[in-house]
């Protein structure tokens, strides 16, 4: 059993939208395939992965550094002999050979993308959905029912509040009961009007979360907190720079309701510092670490161990990214749910065909691996890369 090839292609996921910090008109993603020599049901096992939106494709790093380390490793050094499978931890170690600690930046995205593909292959080799494999390996009961919320509410050129309300109504009509919109890309008064428009639309049918994408300094974050606490929001997300733990801690004095952050922290060390210094409250706040951006599931397991050490439950994690990898982790390891993009970043966002949102939850289908084969538009693109 061995990995015979690692393929990557950088593809556009451009969209004419913006948040408080960036626009997505030139956004890309890396699609990768880890090709094995294993055959299941007459088809060669290929694991697939891609990086989450908001970070550009990592083709250079994957092709110039991490791909060769996997292919140059002795095949037996990457195997899990006890399970007659690949060992994701050993593949991860091979990728990170000769890498200095710290400086997590872009390499964490490259490794996370490849790690996703490795886990997809591992679960396919065992003929199991990844969420069930994870539950078995960690002595848990898998729960295929996963909470999901609809992420949207971006700033679109020329988009008025009426269009924003219609967007949110569309999410409710599809079964969501928590929706999210962007703030920080306009004045406090403009954002207040946008929030009130959405709240008027959703009424008691759903909860609203808001996301500033790290735009604010402390003074502006506090000004928004004073405005936002007038509303029954699901959370106030990423007010300031992701690494400004003092800002996050100070904000709690002005905002007693739930806050969320973590999507731009890319290691278990960063997670530890957030919990040490960021003033996050385990009884109400949410953590949004995204395995596809933060060295993959191998590292995410270390992050969950850090949470345990600080008295946090995995159920306080609702990852960023809206991808099926995090859905599997949520179902297999007991996370609180997952972000989803019903309309954006296709074909990578969304769920397998036929999966519907009911009362804010989806039920995971029993598809081997991560479940990409169940999403017809996505698996077509994937198979063009490696099959």
Image (cartoon, helix red, strand yellow):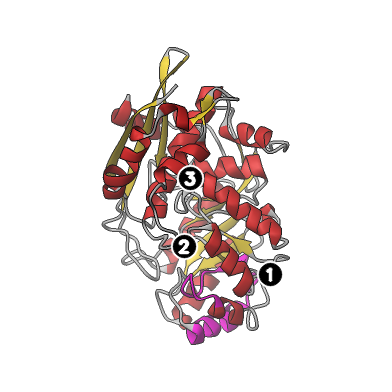
Q: Which residue is mark 3?
A: 323
Q: Which residue is mark 1?
A: 281
Where does residue 192 sit, x and y in percent of width and height?
Answer: 51, 77
Mark closest to the chain's N terminus, 3 or 1: 1
Q: Residues within 10 Å of mark 1 (few under 14, many from 20)?
A: some
Q: Which residue is mark 2?
A: 264
Q: CA distance from mark 3 to mark 1?
A: 26 Å
In the rendered image, which quarter is residue 44 located in?
Answer: top left
Residue 383 visible to the viewer: yes
Q: Residues in magenta?
A: 218-245
**Location of the N terminus (image quadrant):** top left
259 over 43 or under it: above or below: below
SS assignment at label 2: loop
Q: Residues within 10 Å of mark 2 (few under 14, many from 20)?
A: many
Q: Nearer the viewer, residue 6 or 319?
A: 6
285 over 177 or under it: above or below: below
Q: CA distance from mark 1 to mark 2?
A: 19 Å
Mark closest to the chain's N terminus, 3 or 2: 2
Q: Nearer the viewer, residue 39 or 4?
A: 4
- Residue at 67 percent across and 53 percent down: it is 314
Residue 368 visible to the viewer: no
Q: Nearer the viewer, residue 387 or 37?
A: 37
**Residue 227 drawn in magenta:** yes
**Residue 178 drawn in magenta:** no
Q: CA distance from mark 3 to mark 2?
A: 16 Å
158 over 268 or under it: above or below: below
């Amino acid at each position: 059993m061995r990995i015979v090839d690692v393929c990557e292609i950088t593809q556009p996921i451009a969209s004419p939208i913006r948040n408080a910090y960036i626009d997505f008109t030139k956004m890309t993603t890396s699609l990768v395939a880890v090709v094995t020599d294993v055959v299941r049901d007459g088809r060669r096992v290929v694991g697939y992965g891609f990086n989450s939106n908001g970070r550009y494709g990592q083709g250079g790093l994957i092709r110039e550094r991490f791909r060769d380390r996997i292919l140059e490793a002795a095949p037996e050094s990457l195997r899990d002999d006890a399970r007659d499978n690949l060992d994701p931890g050993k593949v991860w170690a091979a990728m990170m050979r000769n890498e200095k600690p710290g400086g997590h930046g872009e390499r964490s995205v490259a490794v996370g993308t490849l790690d996703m593909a490795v886990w997809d292959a591992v679960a396919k080799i065992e003929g199991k959905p990844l969420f069930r494999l994870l539950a078995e390996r960690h002595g848990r009961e898998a729960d295929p029912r996963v909470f999901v919320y609809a992420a949207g509410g971006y700033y679109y050129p020329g988009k008025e509040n009426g269009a924003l309300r219609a967007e949110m109504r569309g999410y409710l009509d599809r079964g969501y009961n928590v929706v999210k919109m962007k703030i920080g890309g306009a004045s406090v008064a403009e954002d207040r009007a946008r929030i009130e428009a959405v709240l008027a639309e959703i009424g008691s049918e759903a909860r609203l979360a808001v996301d500033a994408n790290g735009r604010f300094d402390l003074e502006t974050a506090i000004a928004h907190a004073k405005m936002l606490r007038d509303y029954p929001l699901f959370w106030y997300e990423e007010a300031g720079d992701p690494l400004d733990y003092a800002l996050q801690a100070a904000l709690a004095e002005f905002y007693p309701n739930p806050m969320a952050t973590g999507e731009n922290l890319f290691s278990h060390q960063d997670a530890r510092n957030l919990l040490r210094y960021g003033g996050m409250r385990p009884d109400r706040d949410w953590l949004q670490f995204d395995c596809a951006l933060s060295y993959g599931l191998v590292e995410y397991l270390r992050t969950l161990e850090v949470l345990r050490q600080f008295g946090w439950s995995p159920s306080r994690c609702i990852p960023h990214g809206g991808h099926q990898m995090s859905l599997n982790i949520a179902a297999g390891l007991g996370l609180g749910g997952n972000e989803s993009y019903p309309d954006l970043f296709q074909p990578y966002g969304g769920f397998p065909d036929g999966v519907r949102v009911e009362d804010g939850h989806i039920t995971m289908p029993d598809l081997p691996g991560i479940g990409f084969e169940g999403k017809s538009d996505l698996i077509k693109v994937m198979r063009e890369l490696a099959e």
